[in-house]
Structures are given as structure tokens and as C-alpha cells.
Amino acid sequence: MADWKSPNGITIECRQGDITDQRDIDVVVNAANAELRPGGGVAGAIHRAAGPGLAEECRALAPIRPGEAVITGAYDLPNKWVVHCLGPVYGRDEPSDRLLASCYRNALLLAEGKGSSSIAFPAISTGVFGYPVEPAAEVAIGTVLETVPRLSALRLVRFVLYSSSDLQIHEQVLKRLTAKLG
Ligand code: ADP
């Protein structure tokens, strides 16, 4: 385990698991598509677990562009809110690192705006959108570390990785990026 606590008391942690099963978390993040439709991967799992009310609320908010995020209710998920982020398609939406960073920053600020105390992210863009996991983890964790000083309501940021190899990569990147921060 490679948890890290910021000087203002916010814990960043990496866990293996399913984004739809984060019962102790206020806000879960969806790796959405532009139309905010169910689809496959994380979006399919989130919409299946949330029920049809989520797709209905999403219809009025779509489409969104790469780097953007919107917030909705969580319906039958065990959470309060869902933030839907459209990550960049690797090799198409440029600059992919800045667009991916925007996803994480916007999601954190939306969660903070609702006064939420915890948020869980999947590894946005690393599935069908093709972003290699290690550089994606560097952007994801780097952006959270940059944004954390602006947060006060949020106390916990969790990265939820589906596979043990993705978990290992995120733990290593968290260790490396926080080593210089103390
Ligand atoms: P994108 O379209 O942004 O690439 P995907 O949903 O295809 O999003 O995948 C993003 C990442 O989430 C991938 O690493 C994938 O393995 C992982 N993933 C897929 N389903 C789940 C789930 N239920 N919980 C957590 N992570 C998941």
C-alpha cells in the first residue's frame, strides 16, 4: 500500500476494485463517452448499477468535449454523486496529457463544490481510449497532487484500479511523485 497524506490532511490512496462498489465514497467518477450514454467499460458498469434514471439525467447534459466533466445524482449507486469525465482518445484528442489533466481537475472541483468529503476515480482513458497506463497515472496523480492545496471539503481521493498490474503502476507512480514532497 502506498497511501499519502497531504499537508492539509487529504489522503490519496490506490485500491484494486470496481468503481461501482465504493460504498464509503461520496462521489464516483465515470469514464464517460461524449454522449454520456451507457456504452461499455466503466460507463456501462456505472449505468447498469445506477439504473435508468442516470441516463435520463445525462441526456440533458450531453454532449461534452474531451477534458470536460459534469455532475449528476447517483441513483441506485451507493454514492451521492457521479462526475462524468470525457477523457481524450489517445493519439486523436491533443494535447492528450492536458485534456486528461482537465478531467481530474474538473472532477475534483465539482466534488468540492458539492461539499463532498471523498471521491473515487477509475483510470480514465486507459481502456478503449487507449492511453498507456503509466503516463496516464502520472497525469492523474500529478494533477491530484497539484489540485489538493485548493481543496478543503474533500478528505479522501481514491484511485480504483481494475487489475493488479494497474494497481501496481499507480502505487509506484504515487510513491515516486510524492517522494519529493515529503
Ligand atoms: P475509457 O473509454 O476512458 O478508456 P474504459 O471504461 O474503457 O474508459 O476503461 C477505463 C479503465 O477502467 C480501464 O483501465 C479499465 O480496465 C477500467 N475499468 C473497466 N471497468 C471498470 C470498473 N467496473 N471499475 C473500475 N475500473 C474499471
Image (cartoon, rainbow, N blue to C red):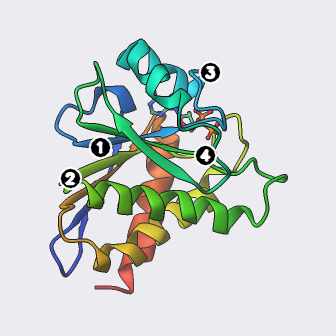
Residue hosting label 1: 27
Q: Residue at x 61, y 57 (%)?
A: 67
Q: CA distance from mark 4 to mark 3?
A: 13 Å
Q: Secondary structure at mark 4?
A: loop
Q: Is residue 178 left or right of residue 136?
A: left
Residue 52 x %, y %: 43, 13
Answer with the quarter of the image where residue 41 lies: top right
Residue hosting label 4: 86
Residue hosting label 3: 39
Q: Residue at x 65, y 32 (%)?
A: 35
Quarter of the picture containing the C terminus is bottom left
Q: Residue at x 15, y 72 (%)?
A: 9
Identified by mark 3, the residue type is Gly
Q: Earlier in the sequence, mark 4 or mark 2?
A: 4
Ligand number 1: quarter of image = top right
Q: CA distance from mark 3 to mark 1?
A: 20 Å
Mark 3: few, some, or many residues within 10 Å (few <14, many ≥20)?
Answer: some
View extreme (right): residue: 92
Identified by mark 2, the residue type is Ser
- Of residue 172 and residue 159, the one placed in the foreground of this image is 159
Q: Earlier in the sequence, mark 1 or mark 4?
A: 1
Residue 92 x %, y %: 84, 52
Residue 136 x %, y %: 60, 57
Q: Which mark is residue 116?
A: 2
Q: Is residue 8 above or below residue 93?
A: below
* Contact (Cβ within 8 Å) of mark 1 with mark 2: yes
Q: Is residue 168 left or right of residue 9?
A: right
Q: Secondary structure at mark 1?
A: strand
